[in-house]
Image (tube, rainbow, N blue to C red):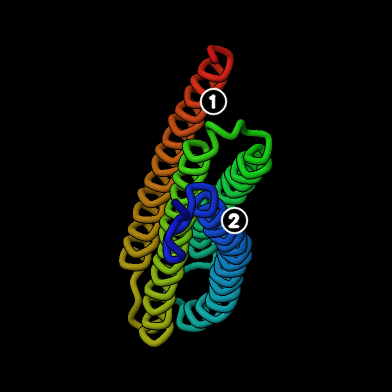
Amino acid sequence: MSQPANMLSEEQMLRMEKTVLYEEALNALHAALDAAGCVVKEFQDAAEYTQSAFRDYDTVLRKSLAQHCSVRHKDFDEMFKNAIEARRRRESELSLSVRQFLSEQTELSQEVLRELASLPQTEQSQQARRTAEVAALTKKFAELQHNRRRELLQLFRDFKAEQEAFSAQLRACIAQAKELRLKDLKAMFEQFQRESEARTRQTQARRKEVAEMLQRFKLQRLKNSKNHYARKNAQ
């Protein structure tokens, strides 16, 4: 008895699943490329903004304080130097997070491509199972990429907001330069340093968490691969 016209064979269903899989994988890889470019640009914009702001306020505030004899050049320069170093350490940690993101995107993209390339060599009896496995990997990759992109972009927005808040404090110092006392200025800079160092430690801790998460993911992939070849050899 012939198969009804509106029913698809198992082979046709599998071909459709593969077509969907290839489209999803292509979309995921395109998204990864877009995310990489977006993350790098956002980081560069945030870093350039803070560097420019610090440079401008260093000159203006230093001149204003000296004009009103509020704070000695030596004292101001020391405080500003420490603040700049704290900001640079923060930028360095963010830069390491960007490099980690680019590395993980490259590694996971290559893994997806390897799995896709291996599908045509899969035995017919294993095609459905392997297609489902690669589809699950592609979905996991897309989720990781989306979450990591969102996390890093928020990190850069927070960094820029912190610098904008500090810039507002510096503007207030310029406006109040005549009455500004050394201890008040010192307290403000020390608070900035403490908060900057705390966020630097948070960034370091998060980068470690991500590295451990990816290591667990790779170990699971390795285990799955070994199981796949074990089943293949047992046939």
| Position of the C terminus by quadrant | top right
Q: Is residue 144 left or right of residue 29?
A: left
Q: Image point 44% across, 76% down: which residue?
A: 167
Mark 1 lies on residue: 225
Q: Mark 2: give few (<14), some (14-19) or many (20+) Cα within 10 Å.
A: some
**Residue 153 % position (x, y):** 46, 64
Mark 2 lies on residue: 22
Residue 81 visible (yes or no): no
Question: The residue tagged with tag 1: helix, strand or loop?
Answer: helix
Work out which residue is located at the far front of the displayed protein and give it: 1
The label number, if any, that marks residue 188 in the structure image? none
Work out which residue is located at the far top of the displayed protein and give it: 234
Reply above or below: 139 against 156. above
Q: Image point 66% across, 39% down: which residue?
A: 114
Question: In front here: 80 or 91?
Answer: 91
Q: Give amino acid for label 2.
A: Tyr
**Residue 111 % position (x, y):** 61, 40
Q: Give amino acid for label 1.
A: Ser
